[in-house]
Amino acid sequence: MDRMPKWADVVLIPLISLILAAALSALVILGIGEDPVAAVKLMVQGAMGSTYGWGYTLYYATNFMFTGLAVAVAFHARLFNIGGEGQAMLGGLGVALVCLYIPWPHWTLALIGACAGAMLFGAAWAAIPAYLQAKRGSHIVITTIMFNFIAAAVLNYMLVNVMRPQGSMDPASARFPEAVQLPTLHELLLPLGINFSKAAPANVSLILAVLACIVVWALIWRTRLGYEIRAYGHSETGALYAGISPVRITMVAMLISGALAGLMATNNVMGEAERLVLNSTEGAGFIGIAVALMGRSHPFGVFLAAILFGFLYQGGAELALWTTIPRELIVVIQALVILFTGALDNMVRIPLERLFMSMNRKRRNRGEGAPLPERKPTQPSE
Amino acid sequence: MTLMKSLMSAAAAMALSAGAALAEPALIFDLGGKFDKSFNEAAFNGAQRWAEETGGSFREIELQSEAQREQALRRFAEAGANPVITMGFAMADPLSTVAPDYPDTKFVVIDVNWLDAPNLRQVSFAEHEGSYLVGMLAAMASETGTIGFIGGMDVPLIRHFGCGYAQGAKAVNEDIEIVANMTGTTPAAWNDPVKGSELTKAQISQGADVIYAAAGGTGVGVLQTAADEGVLSIGVDSNQNHLHPGQVLTSMLKRVDVAVYEAMKAGEDVETGKFELGLADQGVGYALDENNAELISEEMKSRVDQARQDIIDGKIDVVSYYENDSCPALNF
């Protein structure tokens, strides 16, 4: 474990991966005859150069925090929940039902109600694949991804046949009443003397997402349940021996995961659109997988990775607005970042580990390093 | 606060320099993308025609996410683009909040007719009327007495197409069998030629020998399979007769390109209000060219042209699906 200092693991590896992805993206942009430096400037300026840009970056980041946490919690139990998309869709349905059919006096109460609705629906959608995995051994990857399609069909049915207002052709619900509209960062920060952009969609659910990060951290590392989830994730037989029920942990981890994915709807449905539209999740459930991978399933890592992806989304939008770079290429740039930080992690990690090991050896030979450990150095596993 | 101030001033400087640009029109494509061989591409063709004829330039963006709808509208309006042309009914909701904030900018929206703003030009098409005509042609061309309809995503707009089609077919042959399928329930259904091909085969096995595709990019698969299997097909939005000459019976034209072209041509002085382009304004119609001349007999042509005139004169009433969310001629 001590092949590399912690800071290198947490900071250096993602940073090098990012630089590699950026360099490759620059080549791609050069290849189609655009100026990569100008493109990067535009992205940074557009995503972080104004409160307007930050508003969008943080809005996207809020979505990714929820879905990233959802995937991360399931990861700790070695469950690969790729149904965040469907769970977030159903969460949106829960939020819409709560907001439309209950007359709320104030947004604070409505937010509590909406959270309950979102978590309930998201968790319920995760419960069926979880049950099938726990009791029947149906692989969770297959069932969750199939449930994404069922969720899309359910949402489509509800919007086209039940919730669509009379006479409207847009398959979307009616607008939520004024009272349940969440305050944006503009309204929240104005009393503090900060004039945050009015047009940006970032809203109070950002705070909710940060709270969720803290709660998940506490749950995983500070509670008995979190310990059981991690133990089960590390070794099922070991957990069984310790008296931890695999059925219970599978169910509980997936319910929490589904509830977190569902919570995303407080941001995109209640905070931004203020009505339920058909493709309100637009892939955030899948981005959550990349966010959790990059964040090493740690809530703080998820938080940072979510902001990075928010930056890529908003920066990409600015590129699309002001240059002729086609949107497919912007997806390519986003994909390169996912590829390098998620999939090709070992490409950076292994050489870096070698480098640190050889540096340690030299230092030890010169006798300046930390006192030598008594135990024998372990053989590198490869 | 100093960091904040410098950030704000940088943003202000950017907004100023952007605002100084000459007013050019802007075009916002919907999530289907610019080159969807159908709706958005028609708009692009109209804009391209305008640019070639006038030598002007226009700004454009292909949306990637729902949140970008409002964002793109605001950014183009703030940058001084005028008019800002948007595609598709999904823009209705963001426009209803954004348009009042920029009273000096004219907004144009295609496929919407229910908003209320003084600086908005709303263009809709009478798709049911055009579909009625191609439905008549389908019924006349069919030998088996069974025709097919393949929709894209199951939304009211597509049911609206199918409903006009069924009414036209029943007007020719009271007992005609109409097989109707939707490709899917998610936006992916707009671009799934493989599924379109499967549905076509299924409909052929049920006896359909003319199949109408109102399905965006999915229709490419429908037309291809129909041609391979030796049955007739009907294209949509753009004239798709040329895709399989002699095997596409006709295409239901929806002249989105004309609507975009006219709006750009009028520029900042574009007239606002609600405009429904129907048969009378050539906004919709059926395509007749050298590729399908042999398929449409004189008798078919005269009957359809008579019906076209009767619809314009109000003698035939084609019921719109929107009127009470149901279709008198077809169950979905």
Image: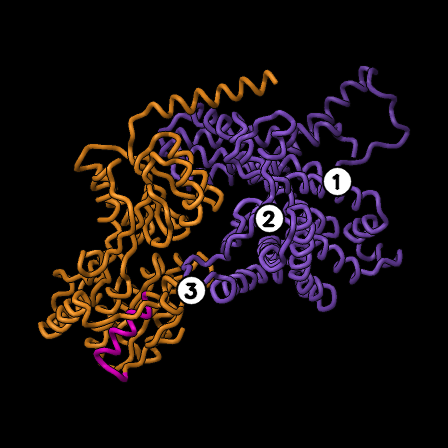
Chain colours: A purple, B orange
The picture places residue A236, in percent across and down from the top left corner, at: 80, 56
| Residue type of the residue flagged with mark 2 | Ala
User: Relative to B219, is A137 on the left or the right?
Assistant: right
Whether A344 is among the magenta residues is no
Of residues A156 and B140, the one drawn nearer to the viewer in this rendering: A156
User: Relative to B191, is A183 on the left or the right?
Assistant: right
Question: Can residue A339 be seen in the rendering of this structure?
Answer: yes
Q: Secondary structure at mark 1?
A: helix
Q: From mark 1 to mark 2, how far is it between C-alphas?
A: 29 Å
For marks 1 and 2, give the one nearer the viewer: 2
The picture places residue B280, in percent across and down from the top left corner, at: 17, 59
| Residue type of the residue flagged with mark 3 | Asp
Residue most toward the front? Answer: A105
For marks 2 and 3, give the one nearer the viewer: 2
Residue marked by disc 2: A179
Label number found at residue B154? 3
Q: Are marks 1 and 2 in contact (CB under 8 Å)?
A: no
In magenta, the rendered stretch is B161-175
